[in-house]
Image: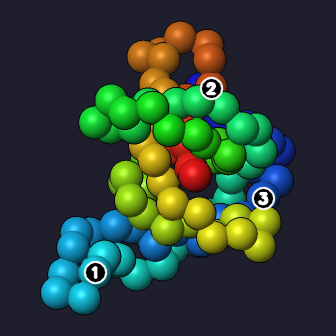
Amino acid sequence: MMLPEWLLRHTAIIEPFEGDGAYGAVYGPEVTERCLVDDERRMVRDAQGAETVSDTTIFFRPGTRCPEGSRVTVNGRVTTVITSFNRDAGGLPTPDHVEVVCR
């Protein structure tokens, strides 16, 4: 079961992080995806295990590529991805999605 289309009320522009270059971060071509945005400040752990504060969590359809360090523009704000999770229930009746935690 996938995240229902009627929940995807927002639009996000994702610039996937591809690494560091001679002049700083390198991003791939931007992609526009429908999503659900939850603006809530909370303490999370990044991919290295360090605690950091997240201001926004974004829920995308399964298969959305949004690696750590990517730039995401949503609701007129530009934010950076702290970490992302593939939420796949393995056939159980829960909505599969990609959860992206941002600064």
Name the amino acid, label 2: Pro
Mark 1, other Cα within 10 Å: few <14 / some 14–19 / many ≥20: few
| Nearest-to-viewer mark from 1 and 3 | 1
Residue appearing at x 60%, y 42% in the figure: 54
The answer to whether residue 25 of the structure is visible from this angle is yes
Amino acid at dot 1:
Gly
| Residue matched to label 1 | 24
N-term mark: 2 or 1: 1
**Label 2: how many Cα within 10 Å (few below 14, some 14–19, many 20+):** some
Q: Is residue 35 left or right of residue 101?
A: right
The residue under the point 63% across, 70% down is 78
Report the amino acid beneath label 3: His
Q: Which mark is residue 56?
A: none
- CA gap between label 3 and label 2 equals 18 Å
Q: Secondary structure at mark 2?
A: loop
Which x, y percent locates residue 57?
A: 64, 42
How is colour applied across the structure in the image?
A: rainbow
Q: What residue is shown with label 2?
A: 95
Answer above or below: position of 88 versus 67: above
Which x, y percent locates residue 20? 21, 73
Q: Residue at x 59, y 63 (%)?
A: 79
Q: Nearer the viewer, mark 2 or mark 1?
A: 1
Q: Earlier in the sequence, mark 1 or mark 3?
A: 3
Evaluate if marks 1 and 3 touch, with contact meaning CB atoms under 8 Å apart. no
Q: Is residue 83 above or below residue 80?
A: above
Farthest-out residue, left? 22
Marks 3 and 2, the one that precedes in the sequence: 3
Rounded to the nearest whole Å, what is the CA distance between mark 2 and mark 1?
Answer: 37 Å
The numbered disc on residue 10 is 3
Q: What x and y, as percent, mark residue 36?
A: 73, 47
